[in-house]
Amino acid sequence: MSDLTAEQAGVGRVQDAYMAMTRRKRTYGAVMLIVFVALMVSGFRVADGRNAGGFWNGIGNIFQFPREVLTEAVAKVANLPGLMWKFLPSLIETVNIAAASTLLGALGAILLSLLATRGLAKWPRLIGLFRRLMDVLRAVPEIVIALVLIFILGGGPVPAMIAIAIHTAGALGKLFSEVNENASLKPVEGLQSVGATWGQRMWLGVIPQVAPNYLSYALLRFEINIRASAILGFVGSGGIGYDLKNAFSWGQGRYDEVAAIFLLLFGTIVFFDQISSHYRNKLIGEG
C-alpha cells in the first residue's frame, strides 16, 4: 500500500513539473510574441516616417500602376509578339549571365566545401577559416558586390556575372559542405593507403558519391540566379533587367514594352523551373 502511495506521489510530482514547464513555455512564448509585435510596429512606424510621401498616403494607389500597364498592354496587344522578339537577345544575355555565374560559383563552392569539411579538408586547422569565408561570401548581397564592381569595371554583364558567382560560391558552399558530411570515408582511406594525393582522393573517392546532390543544388541555384541577373540589370549590369528599367523610365506610352518583358521573364522562369525540377527529382532519386 505504501509503495502504491509513493508511486502516485511520484506521478503527481512529474505531472506538476510538466505543467510548470508548460506554463513557463507559454509565458516565454507570449513574451516573445509581444516583443515581436512591438518590434514590427516600431519598425513600420520608422519606415513609414522615412518613406517619401508616407505609406498610408500612397496605399490607395497600389493597383494604379499595374492597371495602367495592363490597360496599355491590352490596347497594344498586337505589338507584344514583336516586342518579345525584340527583347529576346537581352533575355538570352540574362540567361547566359546566370549560367556562367552558376558554373563559376559551383566550382568555387566545391573547392571551399571540401576544404571546410571535417575528415576531408586538406588543412584541418583552416576549416574554421574556410567556413567563415563562405559565410562572408553569401552574407553580402549580389547587388552590393555588383555596384562595387560596376564602379571599378564599368557597366555590363561581367560585373553581374562576378557578383552572382561570388554569392553563389558562398551559398552553394554551405549546402555542399553539408552533403560532404554524409559521404563515406572508406573510399578516401583506401585511396590514401595507396598513395593518392588529396585532389585524387576528392575526385575519385568523394565526388562520385555527392555529385547527384551537387547537381541538384546547382540547378536550384541556377533558377535563383536567373532572377538575380534580371534584378541586377536595374543597376546597369546589362541583360533584360536593363531594358525593363529603361521601359519603366519612359513611363506611359512604353508600358507595352514592360508587359512584353514581364511575359518573357515569367515564361523563362517557369520553363527553367520545370526543367530543373524534373532533373533534380531524377538526380535525387538516382542518388
Image (cartoon, rainbow, N blue to C red):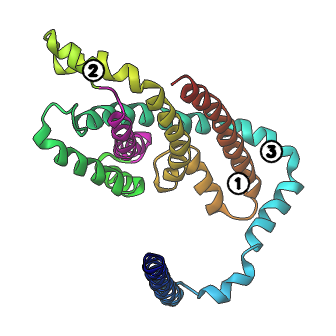
269 shown above or below 202: below
Which one is nearer the viewer's eye here, 115 or 257?
115
Which residue is drawn at the image coordinates 49% and 33% (left, top)? Answer: 99
The 10 Å Cα crowd at callout 2, few under 14, some 14 to 19, many 20 or more, is: few
279 shown above or below 27: above
Name the front one of labels 1 and 2. 2
Residue where numbered disc 3 is placed? 80
Label pair 2/3, CB-CB below 8 angstroms: no
Label 3: which secondary element: helix
Identify the amino acid type marked 2.
Answer: Lys
44 shown above or below 192: below
233 shown above or below 47: above
Residue where numbered disc 2 is placed? 186
Please report the bounds of the magenta region as a residue range: 155-184
Residue where numbered disc 1 is placed? 258
Rendering coords of residue 64 (x, y %): 77, 73
Which one is nearer the viewer's eye here, 251 or 161?
161
User: Residue 170 is drawn in which quadrant?
Assistant: top left
Rendering coords of residue 1 (x, y %): 48, 79
The secondary structure that dominates the magenta segment is helix
Q: Is residue 157 highlighted in magenta?
A: yes
User: Residue 198 is drawn in which quadrant?
Assistant: top left
Identify the amino acid type marked 1.
Answer: Val
Left or right: 258 with respect to 238? right
Indicate which disc, 1 or 2, sits on the residue closer to the N terminus.
Answer: 2
Which residue is drawn at the image coordinates 69% and 82% (left, top)? Answer: 59
How far apart are the two marked residues, 1 and 3, measured between alpha carbons? 10 Å
The 10 Å Cα crowd at callout 3, few under 14, some 14 to 19, many 20 or more, is: some
Identify the amino acid type marked 3.
Answer: Leu
Name the front one of labels 2 and 3. 2
